Amino acid sequence: MKKSILIIALLVVCIFLPAQNTPLYKEIVKELSSKKYQGRGYAKDGVLKAGDYIENQFRKAGVDEVILQPFTININTFSGKMKMSVDGKKLTPGDDFVMREYSPGVKGSFPLYFIDTANFDFEKISKDLQKPEYKNAFVVCDFWFPYKHGKEFSILQSDTTCPNAGLLYTWETGLKFYKAYGENIAAKPIVWTTAEAVRGAKNIKLNVENKFLSNYESSNVIAKINGESHDSCFVFTAHYDHLGNLGRNLYFPGANDNASGTAAIITLAEYYARHKPKYDIIFIAFSGEDANLRGSTYYVNHPTVPLSNIKYLFNLDMIGDNNPVQYCEVSEQGMKGFAEMEAINAKRHYFQSLNRGDLAANSDHYPFAVQGVPCIFYENEEGDAFQYYHTANDTFEHFYFETYELLFKLITEFIGN
């Protein structure tokens, strides 16, 4: 009798043990955001090293199949010299200035021409730039101002007959670095700085090297667990690429964006390898997301399973945070499933709420949503880690694990139902 009670007690304990493997999750996030992978970008092949690591992790998780889906991209990179000074004062890359992703390299000393945004007069600006004191000037204004005068700033940026050497846009808040539109190079360099860095300045000196990579080959890493039925499948996605480098010494670790989602789908693969599902489950670690969704777009055009077979797709991106409200985006075909998730959450109280935003082309769910696939995008916004988004401070030390553990329970219960 006592033996039976002990067995029952052990079974109860096992049932209520956390299903997720948080130690493995932390290990993967820490590894992918380490210096070894140089921000999982292209110039130093960090993205290729990360792909190899993820492939190995899927195999260790016990999946039934792993394949690589190669594709090529053209991408502008900055892994060489990255120097800037203002009136002789040296600025720090990432903190004081960044380059727009489609900027060419630039070297030299340049006067600054500050636009009078309160009395904008493009004809006057054009005449001023002809004056000797503004020869080869960098035109300076607030980042948001050009959105009001797109035609004029297009001339300043693209027209090589216009005498300005480049553009300098200022931010009041922390600087961000991007790669989304790096498939082309603009006619003139574009620099972003903090407003404080150039306030009242007269001249800048730049020495920035770029390297444009043509037909750079990267891969989507695709793992599969066979279910009892093969006519339908669930799909988990996360992108593993990130921003790479800004100069020789600075890299963007991308712990939250998106080592967090990548680690999550690997631990989900480990879980379903131990708990065989009713339907096939596919796990896709995409490359090229930060380069304008290139990997997921390629997959949608070259799917390994018919898109119509996907019962539901879960895209996990930037879940390494602690906001108790979970942000979501849902495709039209995914709304029925979203209602079921809301019901589960209302019962279990995993999150205070699931806050659904408008569907946007901001992560790898979007190419699937456009094709009518039922899908949901999870991203934890406005938590304590979100302030480090697209900065060099998106590190393992600024990472939180609460969202991962709660999402794991929500998703596995949804599939179990």
Image (cartoon, grey):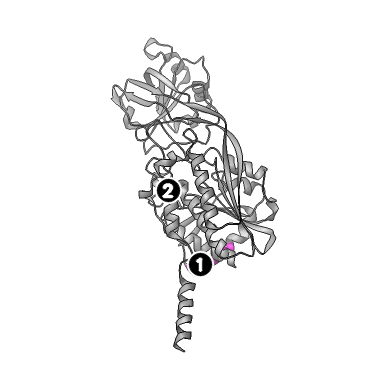
Q: Position of residue 68 (x, y in %)?
A: 60, 45
Task: Please give the residue where the numbered disc 1 appears in the rendered image.
Answer: 346
Front residue of 298/55: it is 55
The residue drawn where x is 51% and y is 67% is: 346
**Secondary structure at numbered mark 1:** helix
Distance, label 2 to label 1, CA atoms, is: 35 Å
- Residue lying at the far bottom of the rendered structure: 1
| Cβ–Cβ under 8 Å for marks 2 and 1 | no
Horizontal placement of 398 versus 332: left or right? left
Question: What's the magenta region?
Answer: 339-348
Horizontal placement of 402 versus 213: left or right? left
The residue drawn where x is 48% and y is 52% is: 263
Label 1, residues with CA under 10 Å away: few <14, some 14-19, many ≥20? some
The residue drawn where x is 54% and y is 53% is: 58
Q: Amino acid at mark 2?
A: Glu
Task: Please give the residue where the numbered disc 2 appears in the rendered image.
Answer: 31
Q: Taking the image as drawn, is residue 390 in sight?
A: no
Q: Position of residue 171 (x, y in %)?
A: 39, 34
Horizontal placement of 163 versus 364: left or right? left
Q: Taking the image as drawn, is residue 410 in sight?
A: yes
Which mark is nearer the camera, 2 or 1? 2
In the depicted structure, whether residue 242 falls above or below residue 266: above
Front residue of 36/151: it is 36
Q: Amino acid at mark 1?
A: Ala
In the rendered structure, does residue 346 fall within the stretch colored magenta?
yes
Front residue of 169/129: it is 169
Prevailing secondary structure class for the magenta stretch in the rendered image: helix
In the depicted structure, whether residue 185 falls above or below residue 287: above
In the depicted structure, whether residue 341 falls above or below residue 69: below
